[in-house]
């Protein structure tokens, strides 16, 4: 078994490294961790740049708006962005790493239509442990009804 990178993987690394070297110096300073509106703006701006360059949703299938990268390319992406100290997913953690992949696997066609807005960051998903936040995620992002037969949506209570 040959574990060396192939020419396509090396080219992917070189393109990504060049893009990061060109893009990162143009980012504004990261906002203070307690300034949520500024952090959201910063994080969505970074995600927009990733999307425009073709690097958003590196692990999402291409047919769902992602890069469709191989597992090796995904690791290269993580290595290079970490080495360059690029911003992480930030404010859209739930959308990109949870809701979007869930929609890919188990969503209806109507629910999958939300993926474009998740990956391009037309909106972010804020979710946590409160019932209100769970209901918002269920209704707005996944398109589930607020109530099923007079009760709460199963699994969201």
Image (cartoon, rainbow, N blue to C red):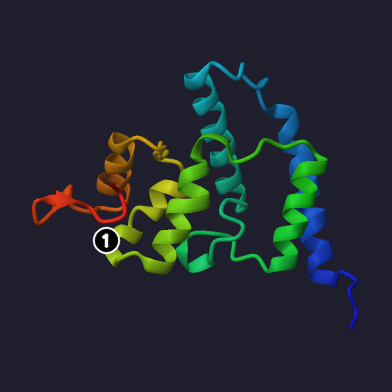
Give the side of residue 142 with respect to residue 151, left or right.
Answer: right
Give the residue pinned by disc 1: 110
| 74 over 140 or under it: above or below | below
Q: Secondary structure beneath disc 1?
A: helix
Q: For the point 57% across and 36% down, which residue is it?
A: 90
Q: Position of residue 88 (x, y in %)?
A: 65, 39
The quarter of the picture where residue 48 lies is: top right
Q: For the point 30% across and 49% down, which residue is it?
A: 156
Q: Position of residue 62 (x, y in %)?
A: 53, 66
| 49 over 100 or under it: above or below | above
Q: Position of residue 57 (x, y in %)?
A: 56, 54
Give the side of residue 112 with respect to residue 110, left or right.
Answer: right
Give the side of residue 34 with respect to residue 130, left or right.
Answer: right
Q: Position of residue 15 (x, y in %)?
A: 77, 54
Query: Which quadrant: the N terminus?
Result: bottom right
Q: For the point 73% across and 51% down, which residue is it?
A: 78
Q: Can you see residue 120?
A: no
The quarter of the picture where residue 8 lies is: bottom right
Callout count: 1
Front residue of 81 and 105: 105
Q: For the point 29% across and 38% down, which residue is it?
A: 131
Q: Can you see residue 148?
A: yes
Front residue of 92 and 17: 92
Q: Residues within 10 Å of mark 1 (few under 14, many from 20)?
A: few
Q: Residue furthest bottom?
A: 1
Give the side of residue 141 with respect to residue 63, left or right.
Answer: left
């Amino acid at each position: 078994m040959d574990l060396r990178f192939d020419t396509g993987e090396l080219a992917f690394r070189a393109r990504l490294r060049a893009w990061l070297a060109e893009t990162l110096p143009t980012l504004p300073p990261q906002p203070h961790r307690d300034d949520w509106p500024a952090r959201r703006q910063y994080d969505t701006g970074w995600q927009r740049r990733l999307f425009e360059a073709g690097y958003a949703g590196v692990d999402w299938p291409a047919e769902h708006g992602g890069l469709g990268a191989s597992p090796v390319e995904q690791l290269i992406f993580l290595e290079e962005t970490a080495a360059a100290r690029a911003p992480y997913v930030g404010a859209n953690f739930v959308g990109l790493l949870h809701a979007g992949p869930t929609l890919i696997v188990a969503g209806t066609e109507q629910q999958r239509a939300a993926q474009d807005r998740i990956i391009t960051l037309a909106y972010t998903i804020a979710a946590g442990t409160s019932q209100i936040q769970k209901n918002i995620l269920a209704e707005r992002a996944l398109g589930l009804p607020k109530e099923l037969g007079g009760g709460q949506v199963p699994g969201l209570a």
